[in-house]
Image (cartoon, rainbow, N blue to C red):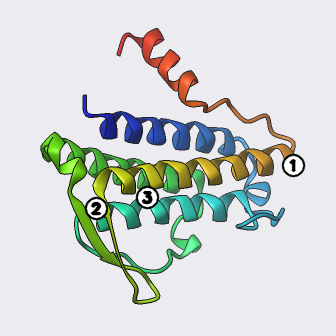
Amino acid sequence: MMPLVTHVKYDRWANLELLRAASHLDPPAFSRCVGGSFPSVHQTFVHLLWAESLWLERWRGGSFPATLDPQEFPTTESLREALEAVHARQLRFLTSIPPSAADEVITYVNFQGQAWAYPLREMVQHLIVHSAFHRGQVVSLLRQLGSVPPHTDYLVYIDTLSETGV
């Protein structure tokens, strides 16, 4: 399996594990302003969804809106559905390209009008690191709200693959 696919599958698993933990919060706690880069668990997950979608569009040479409206994704269920859909599109894209495409440079224009160019593998790595950063923030927010978050380390993911025989 192409390493990029493995990393994106891990990203999907970790995002959904934390979202599953967040689903145990009552709606006011899910939306409560606690602090951080984004004030609530809800808004942090909307940002994660936005970034997952943005980077997929950039990988494909397209563009994506500068923000998503949190009101479009009011519940953990609506976020889960949207995350699963974007993760499925990411995997379809990555499995449809030859392994050599990972080294191809993709150019995009950011929201400030600046052109940037990186190999696809570096853009995927950026997404994984970005998601991990914000998942760490979700862990902190969940703890502040009295919840016990799951472990989403990469090696925990690898162990789950071993346990399920995948």
Marks 2 and 1, Cα distance to the nearest angstrom? 35 Å
Q: Which residue is identified by label 2? A: 59
The residue identified by callout 3 is 52
Q: Are marks 2 and 1 in contact (CB under 8 Å)?
A: no
Graded by Cα atoms within 10 Å as few (under 14), some (14 to 19) or many (20 or more), the crowding at tag 3 reads: many
Tell me how far mark 3 sits from mark 2, CA to CA.
11 Å
Among numbered discs 3 and 2, the one appearing first in the sequence: 3
Residue farthest to the bottom, as pictured: 113
Residue 24, x across and y down, in percent: 71, 41
Task: Please give the residue where the numbered disc 1 appears in the rendered image.
Answer: 144
Expressed as whole percent of the image width and height from the top left, the position of residue 138 reads 70, 50
Count of marks placed on residues:
3
Sequence-wise, the earlier of marks 2 and 1 is 2
**Callout 2: helix, strand or loop?**
helix
Q: Position of residue 28 (x, y in %)?
A: 78, 60
Residue 40's mark?
none
Above/below status of 111 relative to 74: below
As helix, strand or loop, the secondary structure at mark 1 comes to: helix
Q: Is residue 93 visible?
A: no
Kindly indicate whether the residue at mark 2 contacts the one at mark 3 (C-beta within 8 angstroms).
no
- State the image coordinates of residue 17 (x, y, percent, origin top left): 57, 36
Q: Nearer the viewer, residue 117 or 8?
A: 117
First reached walking from the N terminus: tag 3 or tag 1: 3
In this rendering, is residue 161 above or below 122? above
Along the viewing direction, whichever of 73 and 92 lies nearer the viewer: 92
Secondary element type, mark 3:
helix
Which circle, 3 or 2, is nearer the viewer?
2
Residue shown at 47%/63% (left/top)? 51
**With 165 as the anchor, is 41 left or right in this view?**
right
Q: Residue at x 70, y 67 (%)?
A: 38
Residue at image coords 69%, 47%: 136
Q: Is residue 127 visible?
A: yes
